[in-house]
Amino acid sequence: MLAAAAADSKCLVVGVDANAAGMVEASRRAARPGARGLPNAVFVAAAVERLPVELTAVADDVTVNFPWGSLLRGLLAPEPTVLGAVAGTMKPGAQLRVVFSVTDHDGIAGVPTVDDAA
């Protein structure tokens, strides 16, 4: 997320995570004063099922990195509530990218992981 904000200072980059603690270090780095700060990076602590209305139809691009919990289940199942919430953040024609983890640790029951043989 910070790389995207650094790459284009005219682009607003919004990080969303249900676990605010997961964004602490990134938000600290973005808030650094001077040339190393990223004023175009903002952080929102919210679950996908309860995204702020301010995020409705604002995104040109959405990237979901290593989802877990209800977001992971909702993307893989797929669940209309989760897919609707993600889609609801997107402008018409926006692009969605999802990066999944393929390790046992990050998986959910009933969803196979990718191993060397796969």
Image (cartoon, rainbow, N blue to C red):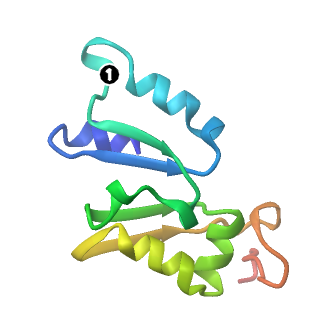
Residue found farthest to the front: 53
Which element carries disc 1, helix, strand or loop? Answer: loop
Q: Identity of the amino acid at label 1? A: Gly
The percent position of residue 64, horizontal first and vertical second, equals: 49, 63
Residue found farthest to the top: 34
Q: Is residue 27 left or right of residue 62?
A: right
Q: Is residue 69 left or right of residue 44?
A: right
For the point 44% across and 24% down, the residue is: 29
Asked which quadrant contains residue 20, the reply is top right
Relative to 10, residue 69 above or below? below
The percent position of residue 39, horizontal first and vertical second, equals: 27, 29
Q: Is residue 93 left or right of residue 66?
A: left
Quadrant of the drawing holding the N terminus: top left
Nearer-the-camera pick, 31 or 50? 50
Relative to 36, residue 107 above or below? below
For the point 38% across and 16% down, the residue is: 32
For the point 78% across and 82% down, the residue is: 112
Relative to 13, residue 84 above or below? below
Q: Which residue is mark 1?
A: 37
For the point 34% across and 37% down, the residue is: 41
How many tags in the picture? 1
Quadrant of the drawing holding the C terminus: bottom right
The percent position of residue 9, horizontal first and vertical second, equals: 18, 37
Nearer-the-camera pick, 115 or 101? 101
Nearer-the-camera pick, 40 or 103? 40
Nearer-the-camera pick, 41 or 82? 82
The percent position of residue 92, horizontal first and vertical second, equals: 21, 78
Residue found farthest to the right: 109
